[in-house]
Amino acid sequence: GFLNLLYDVIVQIGYGIKHFVPNIMNLLLALCEQTEDAFIVNKNQSVENKDLDGDESTAVDRDDYSRIGRVRSLCFLRLSQMLSKFSSSIDFIKFGKRLWNSMT
């Protein structure tokens, strides 16, 4: 919802949201960090369940991975749109460390 709506906001309103870019960047980076944490937790639980049950990952695990992956992918798409749209008018250096950490 939010990530799809943000695309329309960036495209339609454009530089009208310039003053809100730091807040939006913080939200996007927080979403990226949370999806990474959720992916790691989900992966660890899947490994533990596999060890206990001896079964492969279930369809629910694959759905969780897929959902987390889609959200993460949309986050990075919106981050790239924000960077390309506002790079000439906003200094994104202060987001560099968080951005790098969320990508690795």
Image (cartoon, helix red, strand yellow):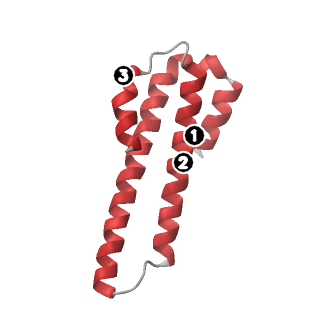
Residue 35 vertical placement versus 18 (above, below): below
Disc 3 marks a residue whose amino acid type is Lys
- What is the crowding at mark 1: few (fewer than 14 residues within 10 Å), some, or many (at least 20)? some
- SS under mark 3: helix
Disc 1 marks a residue whose amino acid type is Leu
Sequence-wise, the earlier of marks 2 and 3 is 2
Q: Are marks 2 and 1 in contact (CB under 8 Å)?
A: yes
Quadrant hosting residue 95: top left
Sequence-wise, the earlier of marks 3 and 1 is 1
Per the image, the residue denoted by label 3 is 94
Which residue extends farthest top? 89
Q: Are marks 2 and 3 in contact (CB under 8 Å)?
A: no
How many callouts does the rendering have?
3
Per the image, the residue denoted by label 2 is 73
Disc 2 marks a residue whose amino acid type is Ser
Left or right side of 4 for 100: left
Residue 16 vertical placement versus 26 (above, below): above
**Percent x, y of residue 81:** 59, 31
Residue shown at the point (31%, 67%) measured from the top left: 44
Distance in Å between CA atoms under marks 2 and 1 = 6 Å
Residue 1 vertical placement versus 80 (above, below): below
Residue shown at the point (56%, 19%) measured from the top left: 86
Quadrant hosting residue 2: top right
Residue shown at the point (67%, 23%) measured from the top left: 13
Distance in Å between CA atoms under marks 3 and 1 = 19 Å
- SS under mark 2: helix
Per the image, the residue denoted by label 1 is 77
Q: Are marks 3 and 1 in contact (CB under 8 Å)?
A: no
The front one of 17 and 41 is 41
**Percent x, y of residue 85:** 60, 23
**Percent x, y of residue 67:** 53, 60
- What is the crowding at mark 3: few (fewer than 14 residues within 10 Å), some, or many (at least 20)? few
